[in-house]
Image (spheres, rainbow, N blue to C red):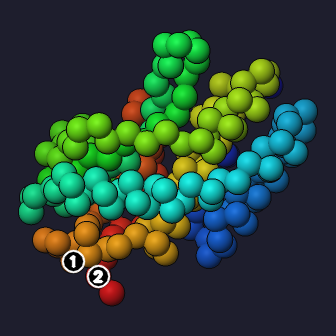
Amino acid sequence: MKFDYSKSWNKLEEIFSSDFGVNEKWDQIIDFHESLFPETNWSAIRQVNITAESNEIKEWLEKLVTEKPFNFETVAFWIGLTKFLDEQTEKEFYVIYLTGCKNYEINEIEWATDPNYIPENSYFSLDFLNKIDNIIFEDKNYSFLDWILPICAGSFVLDDIIKCKLDLEKFLKYKDKMFVTFGFDDGDYIPLTPLRKE
């Protein structure tokens, strides 16, 4: 089957910008892709609780910027998504990491390649993405699903954390507004809701 990447991406952007909650957004993404790939084990994917780690992710982000502070030049944060190799199991697993930059452009991503804030040991393993990865690993559409599902689930969860859970004072020490973008190290990204004082 020939994949329509732009159709899936447009659906992600449409659902991301809606007022639905995290789980409703995730259900809509699954519904959309289930109609395209009915043979995929969507039942097992639906059973993965993508919000189970939200509090841990929130605490990880807050701890990072508290223990390893960024400076006044930082105007944007990049939350990168990548895979590491577990040398013992020889299996890859998903992690996110945080960097900060002194430049930002909403329509391009070059700014994220020149960080001025790089906290050490700033990786967080995402169990919910790794569970999804285990489910789809043998799927014949793995390369496509391994692209769209992590960016969807990750963006929904992280955006909800920014809007509803994060202690904004820890991130708005120098500015009234900070931009945040989430995406793959080597590919697509999505701007999240900016951090801002109310």
Choose between 188 and 85: the one closer to the eye.
85
Q: Residue at x 26, y 46 (%)?
A: 99
Residue found 59% across the figure and 41% down from its top: 127
Q: Residue 104: x and y, percent?
A: 23, 55
* Residue 111 visible in image: no
User: Which mark, by number, is residue 83?
Assistant: none
Quarter of the figure with the N terminus: top right
Label 2 near label 1: C-beta < 8 Å?
Answer: yes
Residue 49 on image: x %, y %: 70, 54
Label 1 and label 2: CA atoms lie apart by 5 Å
> Most extreme residue toward the right, as rendered?
39
Q: Quadrant of residue 63?
A: bottom left
Residue type pointed to by label 1: Asp
Q: Where residue 132 appears, x then y in whole percent?
A: 69, 38
- Location of the C terminus (image quadrant): bottom left
Q: Which residue is mark 2?
A: 197
Q: Is residue 125 visible?
A: yes
In the visual, does 2 lie left or right of 61? Answer: right
Q: Which residue is mark 1?
A: 176
* Depicted 104 relative to depicted 119: above or below: below
Q: Is residue 66 left or right of residue 20?
A: left
